Image (tube, rainbow, N blue to C red):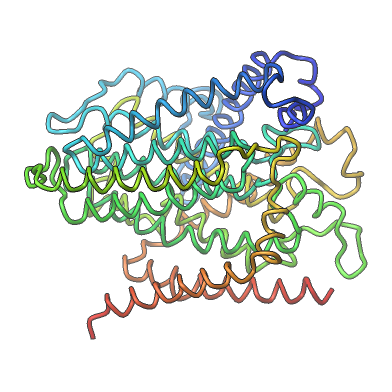
């Protein structure tokens, strides 16, 4: 966006960034809901899914949003009103800040900062506060239990996620996301540079750990203890209705989309495809589409696991994080560091 | 980044719009932080206090970023907001799940804590003014993450390792205290 916006005033630039950011959050989220939640899940369960609204049910999503907007926004009598109402915004803020670090082309970025991926991981941890606020302010024991479970889970899986990214950062030698993409585009594997060096090959262990941790961060099955409907109604979402429930819902799927895009950027080469120069101006046009395609590929796996596996027990969930994923990612960092020095 | 580029050529006192905008931003953030800090210690609700603390810490992260210390600012968000406050909230909600005002927190320790806080403020302010009263922020280059990393692992390697060992000791200590068998 740097080239496009070079001559505009600050407020014009900011307005355009806001609008593009809004589209960049909502469009992938809607795509995921329709493509995977509505259609793929239906096909896996041998049914058609929504078919009535629009061709092949494609406008079902708009109908759902319209339905949620009409519903009454109920606040429980015993709730802490202000915090109850603020909680969904905190979750959404975290989501919207996270999209900022992902570049969609050589000149298409929101912020090109030095701390890059570190900033992304930092802002993604803010959503926990929103979840705790929601659970506590609802003044319901299901909500509180759900929020506590969510927090325990998010803290446990944030560590392996950050440690998995450290492997990528060591190999690329930078925290800047744009430079990580460039490093993958111009990299070579044992002297062969034909396909660049997507880190999914060299950092395969890191990629797996990252995907598992993302699954847990999104509280998607099999890591959906916090919203386990058979035990906790819907956890911290129990008391929410209408537009505030919709905000949590959008937040959940937008975060799924953005984490998929982040995984695609860190491990699959981001907006780059082999065959063109990485600085080619064409990427400013096709970059977002390539990134969307790669994002859908990663999201496909996330939702595939979501629809396939049964739920973990709480102790199994914590054991997987602390006893398997964290040691594994530490070993991955050591090996990556050694190899980086050797080669 | 373009803001930093413009800042590079500016005199800190007479420089143009960028510095003015920075001062306004600093003023706004400072007011919000002061208000939240006051509310944090005066509110009767422990969870509200922890949430006000979030605002204070976010404000200090914003001020770090305003000063060009991007890495420190982001670390502030990750460590303090993302981890420490979350643990505070987690602990509070686990032990006193009930909503509303905490009746046990009566004002007996208020005087003492005011005294301690006042002393701490005087000592910190004195030390800071003594050391940095005529120091000026170099606007030529905001510290990049690479320089921070380089200086930690060259110039400050011994303090860094000392802190690491200290943290490890605290970690082991916590586990020893917590385990039952």
Q: Is residue A313 left or right of residue A297?
A: left
Q: Residue at x 57, y 23 (%)?
A: B23
Quarter of the rendering occupied by the C terminus of chain A: bottom right
Depicted B19 relative to depicted B79: above or below: above
Q: Quadrant of residue A133?
A: top left
Q: Is residue A141 left or right of residue B91?
A: left
The spot of residue A148 in percent (x, y) is 28, 53
Q: Is residue B153 left or right of residue A328?
A: right
The spot of residue A225 in percent (x, y) is 33, 57
The spot of residue B63 in percent (x, y) is 53, 35
Q: How many numbered marks does the figure carry? A: 0
Q: Residue at x 62, y 43 (%)?
A: B69
Depicted B95 relative to depicted B161: above or below: above
Q: Residue at x 50, y 59 (%)?
A: A213
Return the residue nearer the eye: A15 or B147. Answer: B147
Q: Residue at x 29, y 33 (%)?
A: B38
């Amino acid at each position: 966006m740097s080239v496009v916006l070079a001559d505009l005033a600050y407020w014009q630039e900011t307005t355009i960034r806001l609008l593009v950011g809004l589209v960049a959050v909502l469009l992938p989220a809607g795509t995921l809901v329709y493509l995977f939640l509505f259609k793929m899940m239906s096909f896996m369960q041998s049914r058609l899914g929504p078919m009535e609204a629009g061709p092949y049910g494609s406008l079902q999503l708009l109908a759902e949003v319209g339905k949620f907007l009409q519903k009454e926004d109920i606040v429980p009598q015993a709730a802490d009103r202000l915090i109850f109402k603020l909680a969904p915004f905190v979750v959404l803020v975290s989501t919207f800040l996270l999209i900022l670090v992902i570049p969609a082309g050589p000149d298409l970025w929101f912020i090109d900062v030095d701390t890059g991926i570190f900033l992304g991981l930092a802002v993604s941890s803010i959503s926990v506060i929103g979840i705790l606020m929601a659970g506590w302010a609802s003044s319901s024991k299901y909500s509180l239990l759900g929020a506590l479970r969510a927090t325990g889970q998010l803290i446990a899986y944030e560590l392996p996620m950050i440690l998995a990214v450290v492997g990528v950062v060591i190999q690329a030698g930078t925290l800047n996301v744009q430079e990580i993409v460039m490093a993958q585009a111009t990299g070579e594997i044992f002297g062969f540079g034909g396909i660049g060096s997507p880190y999914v090959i060299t950092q395969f262990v890191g990629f797996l750990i990252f995907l598992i941790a993302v699954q847990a961060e999104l509280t998607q099955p099999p890591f959906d203890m916090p919203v386990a409907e058979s035990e906790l109604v819907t956890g911290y979402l129990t008391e929410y209705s209408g537009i505030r429930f919709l905000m949590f819902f959008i937040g959940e799927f937008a975060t799924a989309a953005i984490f998929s895009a982040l995984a695609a950027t860190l491990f699959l080469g981001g907006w780059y495809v082999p065959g063109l120069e990485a600085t080619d101006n064409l990427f400013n046009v096709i970059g977002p589409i390539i990134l969307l395609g790669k994002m859908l590929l990663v999201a496909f796996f996330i939702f595939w696991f979501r629809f396939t596996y049964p739920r973990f027990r709480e102790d199994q969930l914590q054991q997987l994080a602390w006893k398997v994923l964290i040691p594994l990612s530490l070993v991955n960092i050591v090996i990556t560091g050694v190899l980086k020095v050797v080669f | 980044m373009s803001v930093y580029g413009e800042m590079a050529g500016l005199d800190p006192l007479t420089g143009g719009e960028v510095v003015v905008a920075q001062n306004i931003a600093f003023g706004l953030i400072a007011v919000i932080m002061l208000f939240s800090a006051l509310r944090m210690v005066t509110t009767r609700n422990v969870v509200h206090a922890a949430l006000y603390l979030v605002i204070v810490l976010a404000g200090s992260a914003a001020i770090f970023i305003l000063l060009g210390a991007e890495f420190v600012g982001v670390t502030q968000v990750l460590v303090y907001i993302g981890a420490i406050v979350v643990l505070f909230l987690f602990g509070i909600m686990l032990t006193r799940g009930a909503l509303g005002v905490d009746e046990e927190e009566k004002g007996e320790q208020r005087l003492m804590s005011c005294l301690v806080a006042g002393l701490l403020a005087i000592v910190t302010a004195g030390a800071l003014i003594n050391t940095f009263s005529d120091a000026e922020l170099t606007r030529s280059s905001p510290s990049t993450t690479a320089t921070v990393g380089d200086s930690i692992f060259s110039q400050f390697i011994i303090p860094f390792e000392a802190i690491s060992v200290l943290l490890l000791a605290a970690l082991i200590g916590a586990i020893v205290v917590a385990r039952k068998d």
